[in-house]
Image: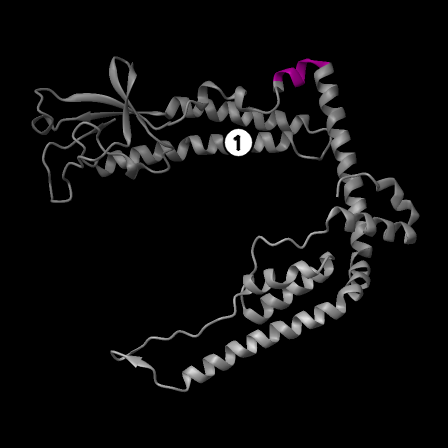
Amino acid sequence: MGICEGNIRNEDDIPDQSYDFLILQEKKKDGLDLYKPKETLFNSFKIKCPLCKLKLSKEEYDAIDNKLNTANEQHLFDLIYKYNQETNSLFPVDNISTLENIYNEIKEYSRNLEENRYFKHTCINNKLCQRLNNQDIYIDIVHSSILNSIDYNLDLDINRLKHDENYKNNYILNREIKYNKYLKQQQKEEIENKYRKEFEEITFQKEQLYYQMTINDINFHIEQCNQRNAFFNSYDIQSGGYSKRIDEKVNAEGLWYSYEYQFRYSGTRKKLQNYIEENTNQTLYGINTKMENWEYEEFQKFILEREPSYSEFIGNNN
């Protein structure tokens, strides 16, 4: 419980007429007005008295912080996220005991949060608020309605998992399917990574002539830019005592789109990207150097010629 001091002690303690962080609720608590934060509350200093709009006392801020340290809704969000992450994880396949432990944490923490969510505050700045008597209110430190819908926010019904054998068996079976699919995808990627460098070197040879011509062009543009900068920097071009000219730079994105269309294979395109970035000191964002479907099919045939067992992965997603 906290009390607003009746006198304004210094120029910092003046009403904040724009303060609107605490919102008056339609329902009351114990017959008193109830105020809720309009967003998740992380520390007490966002709280002011919603009546007189003055800061609270240090003791009140300490009391609210103690409540937040004991129970805050962000930690409850984190526990729910942890539960859902575990539900959708790939392994271990049988994680029911882990889910039960997290669920018990959620329920215990939600009870704790419910017990500590309300702070009773007394405002005695009657003259400032134009009233005769002190006014008691409650401040709710919980913003969301999460406490009323915890199970709704969980990706898996833990009670059915514990008491419905079919539900449990289907859950375990689906996890096994997902895990086996993950293992197979990992094996597929390991095989592809084994041959990717060799494939890129071979396909690069098909485009090497055009690539070298492109590199020559890029070097020419960069050299021309450097020569222009050197020329202008050799003169004292001033206006009002300040230099007007800034060294120009070759635009990496412009170079990329001027030449990338000439190359079909992803390995060549990656080489072009690396060369442009290294020689312009710029990073290219949002460009495409991935294999297209036709190249990926060619890559798969390339692997099959060297490792026939790879055929069991053909048809899976890349």
Q: Position of residue 277 (x, y in %)?
A: 59, 66
Q: Principal SS element in the magenta part?
A: helix
- Nearest the viewer among 203 and 161 is 203
Q: What residue lies at 40% left-to-right and 73% top-to-bottom?
A: 246
Q: Position of residue 226 (x, y in %)?
A: 51, 79
Q: Magenta residues, as a range? A: 159-165
- Nearest the viewer among 241 and 52 is 241
Q: Is residue 142 left or right of residue 102?
A: left
Tell me: residue 279, above or below residue 152: below
Tell me: residue 61, above or below residue 261: above
- Which quadrant of the structure image shows residue 94? top right
Q: What residue lies at 46% left-to-right and 83% top-to-bottom?
A: 230
Tell me: residue 94, above or below residue 303: above
Q: What residue lies at 57% left-to-right and 52% top-to-bottom?
A: 286
Q: Residues within 10 Å of mark 1 (few under 14, many from 20)?
A: some
Quickly name the residue at label 1. 79
Q: What residue lies at 63% left-to-right and 73% top-to-bottom?
A: 217
- Which quadrant of the structure image shows residue 103? top right
**How many labels sit on residues?**
1
**According to the image, what is the colour scheme of the structure?**
one colour
Tell me: residue 167, above or below residue 16: above
- Nearest the viewer among 63 and 270 is 270
Q: Quadrant of the C terminus?
A: top right
Secondary structure at badge 1 equals helix
Q: Is residue 145 left or right of residue 164?
A: left
Kindly identify the amino acid type of the residue bearing the numbered disc 1: Leu
